[in-house]
Image (spheres, helix red, strand yellow):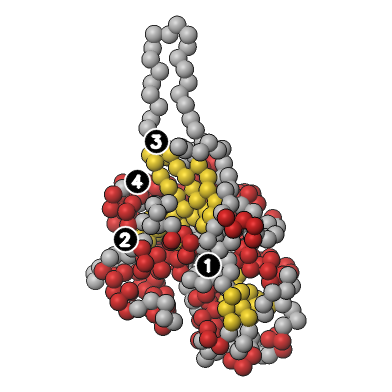
Amino acid sequence: MKKLSRGLKSVCSLALALMLTMSLVACGGSSSSAAPASSAAPAPAGSSEATPAPAEKIPLKISHHPYIHALPSVYAEQNGMYDKYDYEITQYSGGPTQNEAISSGAWEVGSTGTGGAILGASGYNLKVIGFTCGDTNTTDLWVRPDSPLLKAAQDENGIYGTAADWKGMKILCPTGTSCQMVLIGTLEHLGLSQNDVEVIDMSVAQSFPAFKAGEADMVALWSPFGFAAEKEGWVKVSSAKQLGINLPCLVVATEDAVKNRPEVVQDWLQTYLDAGVALNDQETEKTAQLLFDFEKQEGIKMEEDVSILEVENRPFPTIEENKALFLEDADGTCEAERILLTFADFMISQGKLTEADKQRMIDNNFVDTSFMKNIK
């Protein structure tokens, strides 16, 4: 039975007791919302005309993370673009838990980070069907202003310290995510591996308040928490941008949805991308306010000026940009696939994937270009 709700109404996971000031849920948690119920108006008394049956709505299960790449769904919900769906939206704290929910059929379409897309494609045959606002400018490693690391010099990339300075550090970082990619990239840049530091697996929403409370020596953050970190006086010691790591966020669909409901996937992708364009086109302050209200409802505290920075640093791709990324070359590949295979290679080097996993992803067409071809 569909739940009755008028907005994005959070339903916390069993890990709610662990939620801190800025935490959404513990790693593995999610929140859900459902479309509001509707009914046809009754015919006037004495009328001989039968009331037309309301149009049948399309069932759809949508998933996101409680960050800016969920905003097109928020906009679509508030502006009637989702009225055609009998939908539920589930917000996951990160890619790993979102992927785990695929097996139970908890969702069909949505958005995720780079790490979530790669591991989802490898483990669950998840399909990438579009790009959305990326994390390249906003995925960083931070220390407190009294960190000994800040006494060390910066290298040509702006990375603080040497291998000796980083060894043994305790670092809060969600595994299997773009944050971990930046951490591993930094360690490799310094000639180290994860074995040289102590990684504490914790969701970004939890790790920010934990680090603020004094836990660990370093924290890996994506936005909007990085903007808040700067306001706390923390110092950025490495970043995706400094390392030249491209971190797209992706629009995805489950294998089951692609095989059995391709027309629904197509329709939703068009709606999501159109909503992203509309968010780009309206005033920055208006989009920022929508983000601010959404984050607040999802339990993430954000200053209003931070929401503006988030919108300015993470625009949604245009339709033309997306179509170019998914345009197949003569050899049948596309730029989107090449970008993502770079990450697959990166994860292979860290033992997270095998060459066989990568080949299986390619053979299964993990980047599905068929939907973008029909986008208008």
Image quadrant in which you'd find residue 166: bottom right
N-terminal of the pair, mark 1 or mark 3, is 3
N-terminal of the pair, mark 3 or mark 2, is 3
* Residue situated furthest bottom in the rendering: 164
Tag of residue 46: none
The residue indicated by pointer 1 is 135
x, y percentage for residue 326?
Answer: 34, 63
Q: Is residue 254 left or right of residue 39?
A: left
Q: Nearer the viewer, residue 132 or 170?
A: 170
Q: Nearer the viewer, residue 79 or 300?
A: 300
N-terminal of the pair, mark 3 or mark 4, is 3
The residue indicated by pointer 2 is 368
Q: CA distance from mark 3 to mark 2?
A: 26 Å
* Residue situated furthest top in the rendering: 46
Q: Amino acid at mark 1?
A: Asp
Q: Please, what secondary structure does the residue beneath circle 2 have?
A: loop
The residue indicated by pointer 3 is 57
Q: Nearer the viewer, residue 26 or 186?
A: 26
Q: Is disc 3 in contact with disc 2, using a CB cutoff of under 8 Å?
A: no
Tag of residue 264: 4
Q: Is residue 210 left or right of residue 117?
A: right
Q: Is residue 320 visible?
A: no
Which mark is nearer the camera, 1 or 3? 3
Q: Is disc 2 in contact with disc 4, using a CB cutoff of under 8 Å?
A: no
